[in-house]
């Protein structure tokens, strides 16, 4: 399926014209090819039900709406979105792909304690965070249709899974710490070689007919400094397993860390929890070697 997606994406590069952007529902989930050092073992994982099994009733309508919100967030949840990303840009195959934080890997694990806000979060509250940070927007109020539909979609996708047991393929892989400290220049070389073709020389991505074909990696239209992808451990794990699109698990771990560093050493929208100064905000929310917020790179303090 990823292969089809990749062909679709490549084709849209060439066509750059009107096309039916939403791919057809494909029932089978394929693994990213397992290879190289820390690639996830080819463990079998949960197979979510095919989209064709979404029921044709009022409940099914909410599930289908949840899927639409997931894949075309700026259109179906406009009021809560502040950039050009879609949920699916980081949770591939409409939230179905293993090792890409699939929704079937998340739903059975909530409520959960989160260090990020230091309390137990319901699934709905977890979704609110995605809008505030990854989508650089506003949290839909609890009970809002947007959250209900997304929750219905994740619930439906998780049918027959045990509750409270982390399924193989959940979340993003955690890479071992890199042998050499992540490096801007090496990351830039990886970016030029393996990423710029799709994401653009300035990480700006590409839009065709009002739809994001290649999502922006930094800048005003990307995720903000409060998002999970801002962390080098999350970003390197996501990139290793899933990028370059269609060629997951082909980068070395070091390349994945270096290019994650390069990506996150660029500016992006401010952390919405900003406390008036970058130093204070770093102390409160970014006090980890995995965040470059407030760090000086190439003579510039990131986040200022
Ligand atoms: C820029 C990339 C990005 C976008 C866009 C994004 N997410 Fe995420 N999402 C992440 C990352 C990274 C994590 C995990 C890291 C963390 O815990 O913060 C995550 C975690 C999650 C989780 C919890 C996963 C788990 O296994 O516990 C859910 C649920 C989720 N996202 C839903 C969404 C929804 C719904 C949207 C769209 C409204 C969305 N995300 C948009 C990057 C993204
Ligand atoms: C063949 C085109 C292609 C290449 C090459 C590619 N990407 Fe992507 N990338 C995509 C697409 C398309 C998505 C969104 C996936 C989706 O919606 O299914 C994406 C999503 C992402 C995301 C999450 C969304 C965001 O904007 O933050 C990151 C991070 C990312 N890519 C980084 C990289 C890095 C780093 C490289 C190089 C190692 C790379 N990509 C190479 C096409 C590509």
Image: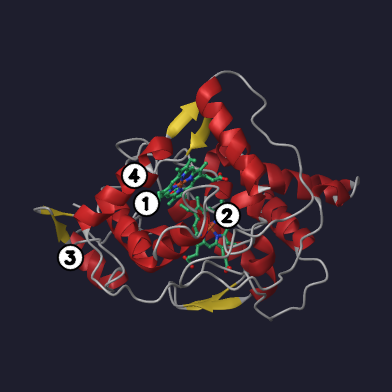
Q: Is mark 2 within 8 Å of ligand 1?
A: yes
Q: Label 3 vs label 1: CA separation? A: 17 Å
Q: Position of residue 176 (x, y in %)?
A: 40, 76
* Residue identifier under label 3: 279
Mark 3 Cα-neighbour bin, 10 Å: few <14, some 14–19, many ≥20: some
**Mark 2 or mark 4: which is in front?**
4
Nearest the eye: 156 or 58: 156
Does 127 sit above or below residue 284?
above
Q: Earlier in the sequence, mark 3 or mark 2?
A: 2
Q: Earlier in the sequence, mark 2 or mark 1?
A: 2
Q: Earlier in the sequence, mark 3 or mark 1?
A: 1
Residue at figure coordinates x 26%, y 49% from the top left: 188
Nearest the eye: 253 or 18: 253
**Mark 4 or mark 3: which is in front?**
4
Tag 1 secondary structure: loop
Q: Which mark is residue 193?
A: 4
Q: Label 2 vs label 1: CA separation? A: 17 Å
Nearest the eye: 271 or 237: 237
* Residue identifier under label 2: 91
In screen coordinates, is 288 left or right of 124?
left
In screen coordinates, is 219 left or right of 116?
left
Q: Label 2 vs label 4: CA separation? A: 24 Å
Q: Label 3 vs label 2: CA separation? A: 31 Å
Given contact means CB atoms under 8 Å apart, are the residues at marks 2 and 4 in contact? no
**Mark 4 or mark 1: which is in front?**
4
Tag 3 secondary structure: helix
**Mark 3 or mark 2: which is in front?**
2
Residue at the outermost left position: 299
Residue at figure coordinates x 77%, y 50% from the top left: 63
């Amino acid at each position: 399926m990823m292969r089809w997606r990749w062909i679709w994406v490549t084709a849209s590069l060439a066509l750059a014209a009107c096309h039916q952007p939403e791919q057809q529902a494909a029932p089978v989930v394929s693994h990213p090819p397992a290879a190289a050092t820390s690639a996830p073992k080819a463990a079998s994982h949960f197979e979510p039900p095919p989209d064709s099994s979404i029921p044709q009733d009022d409940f099914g309508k909410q599930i289908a709406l949840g899927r639409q919100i997931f894949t075309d967030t700026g259109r179906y949840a406009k009021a809560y979105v502040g950039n050009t990303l879609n949920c699916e840009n980081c949770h591939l195959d409409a939230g179905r792909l293993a090792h890409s934080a699939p929704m079937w890997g998340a739903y059975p694990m909530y409520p959960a304690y989160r260090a990020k806000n230091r309390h137990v979060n319901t699934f709905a509250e977890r979704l609110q965070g995605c809008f505030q940070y990854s989508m650089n927007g506003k949290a839909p109020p609890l009970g809002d249709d947007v959250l209900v539909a997304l929750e219905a979609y994740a619930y439906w996708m998780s049918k027959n899974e045990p509750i409270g047991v982390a399924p193989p393929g959940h979340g993003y892989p955690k890479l071992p710490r890199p042998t050499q400290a992540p490096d801007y220049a090496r990351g830039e070389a990886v970016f030029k070689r393996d990423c710029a073709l799709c994401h653009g020389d300035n990480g700006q991505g590409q839009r065709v007919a009002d739809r994001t074909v290649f999502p922006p990696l930094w800048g005003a239209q990307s995720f903000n400094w409060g998002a999970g992808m801002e962390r080098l451990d999350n970003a390197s794990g996501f990139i290793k397993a899933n990028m370059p699109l269609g060629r997951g698990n082909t980068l070395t771990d070091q390349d994945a860390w270096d290019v994650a560093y390069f990506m996150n050493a660029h500016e992006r929208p401010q952390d919405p929890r900003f406390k008036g100064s970058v130093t204070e905000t770093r102390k409160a929310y970014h006090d980890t070697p995995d965040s470059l917020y407030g760090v000086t790179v190439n003579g510039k303090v990131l986040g200022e």
